[in-house]
Image (tube, rainbow, N blue to C red):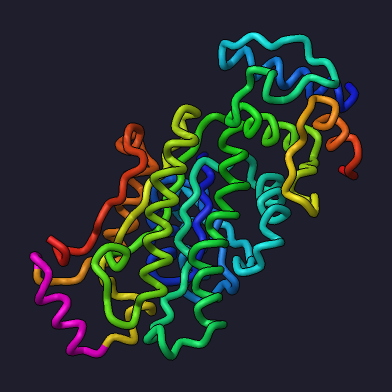
């Protein structure tokens, strides 16, 4: 499964657990408009580290968090496992 | 078997916690810079119980190495159910004459390090939707004591961290509590004179000092069924010193 599919599938799983409905997860969708709250993203980052063996936000030099789905996926695609 | 990570487990309160949890059937991951004879004995003794103690050498002041260390623990021991942030230093000194490097070391080991360690362990707990976190505060966080201003600040930080983190992770079934021991007979209080020790014991409602095992018993309780609905709390263990 590609990194993108893995991320989308985890987001859908967390949304199910939190009983929320996600909009279509297009690349330019702002993360704030996904309906996932900050805790949801914390769970997402934790699970992705477990499954993909990487955490782009720990190894990044800057503390910036991505703004859109596309930025988020690229953050994971652009770091070594 | 539950895995419980205990920092500063080579002596004092941490060692008592490791011994007690292993005797109760837990797998204790004992973290300290050096192993030491006392921990060797505890590891050997644990082999005869239903639990076990595994030692991992790590210098918690190396904050940058914590993420990889937690990943390594996960790989070796699997999911961590409990985290006991016990490691700490108790450097004394009047603020006016403490060296800045001593102040920085106190804040690094007593505040920054447990917060970063908790970040990475709690993330795994969040993914698992279960876990217990226990931070070591102190009665000095609320009472004050001459020569312990920086130490007191770090222990007040532990209590504040506990309450807010409990709010953040509560809905995921993770509890976060703090223990505030009074003066307890360990190496950290070894610098107190006999007179000071008697004075402190004399001021306590029970006319004695609490022991490391008293703290260990409370950790065991908070990690067990009794702790299921306790979160964001600070449990004082001081034989009534602040009563």
Position of B10 with respect to A52 (left or right) is: left
- The residue lying at 63 percent from left, 21 percent from top is A36
Position of A80 with respect to B104 (left or right) is: right
Q: Quadrant of the C terminus of chain B?
A: bottom left
Instruction: Provide residue B178's location: percent of width, then percent of height.
Output: 36, 52
B10 or B26, nearer to the observer: B10
Residue B205 belongs to magenta span:
yes
Magenta stretch secondary structure, dominant: helix
Position of B43 with respect to B216 (left or right) is: right
- The residue lying at 40 percent from left, 52 percent from top is B160
In this view, B190 is above or below A73: below
Residue A23 belongs to magenta span:
no
In this view, B158 is above or below B102: above
- The residue lying at 50 percent from left, 49 percent from top is B83
How many tags in the picture? 0
B153 or A48, nearer to the observer: B153
B67 or A24, nearer to the observer: A24
Instruction: Provide residue B172's location: percent of width, then percent of height.
Output: 50, 29
Q: Does any portion of residue A60 appear in the rendered image?
A: yes
In this view, B173 is above or below B179: above
Q: Does any portion of residue B9 appear in the rendered image?
A: no
B20 or B47, nearer to the observer: B20
**Quarter assignment of residue B194:** bottom left
Range of magenta residues: B193-206
Instruction: Provide residue B186's location: percent of width, then percent of height.
Output: 34, 75
Instruction: Provide residue A9's location: percent of width, then percent of height.
Output: 76, 18
In this view, A44 is above or below B95: above
């Amino acid at each position: 499964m590609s990194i993108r599919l893995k991320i989308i599938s985890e987001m859908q799983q967390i949304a199910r657990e939190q009983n929320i409905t996600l909009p279509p997860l297009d690349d330019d969708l702002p993360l704030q408009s996904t309906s996932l709250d900050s805790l949801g993203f914390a769970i997402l980052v934790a699970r992705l580290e477990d499954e993909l063996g990487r955490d782009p936000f720990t190894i990044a030099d800057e503390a910036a968090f991505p703004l859109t789905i596309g930025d988020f996926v690229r953050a994971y695609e652009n770091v070594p496992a | 078997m539950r895995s419980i990570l205990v920092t500063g487990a080579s002596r004092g309160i941490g060692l008592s916690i490791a011994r007690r949890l292993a005797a109760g059937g837990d797998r204790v991951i004992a973290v300290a810079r050096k192993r030491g004879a006392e921990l060797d004995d505890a590891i050997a003794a644990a082999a005869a119980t239903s639990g076990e103690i595994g030692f991992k050498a790590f210098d918690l002041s190396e904050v940058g190495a914590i993420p990889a260390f937690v990943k390594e623990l996960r790989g070796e021991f699997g999911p961590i159910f409990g985290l006991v942030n016990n490691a700490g230093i108790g450097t004394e000194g009047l603020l006016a004459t403490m060296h800045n490097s001593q102040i920085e070391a106190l804040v690094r080991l007593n505040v920054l390090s447990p917060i970063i360690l908790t970040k990475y362990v709690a993330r795994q707990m969040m993914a698992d939707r279960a876990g217990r976190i226990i931070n070591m505060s102190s009665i000095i966080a609320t009472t004050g004591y001459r020569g312990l201003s920086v130490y007191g600040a770090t222990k007040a930080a532990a209590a504040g961290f506990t309450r807010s983190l409990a709010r953040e992770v509560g809905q995921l079934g993770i509890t976060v509590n703090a223990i505030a021991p009074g003066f307890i007979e360990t190496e950290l209080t070894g610098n107190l004179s006999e007179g000071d020790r008697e004075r402190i014991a004399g001021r306590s409602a029970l006319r004695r000092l609490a022991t490391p095992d008293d703290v260990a018993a409370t950790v065991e309780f908070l990690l067990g069924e009794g702790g299921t609905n306790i979160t964001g709390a600070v449990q004082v263990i001081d034989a009534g010193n602040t009563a």
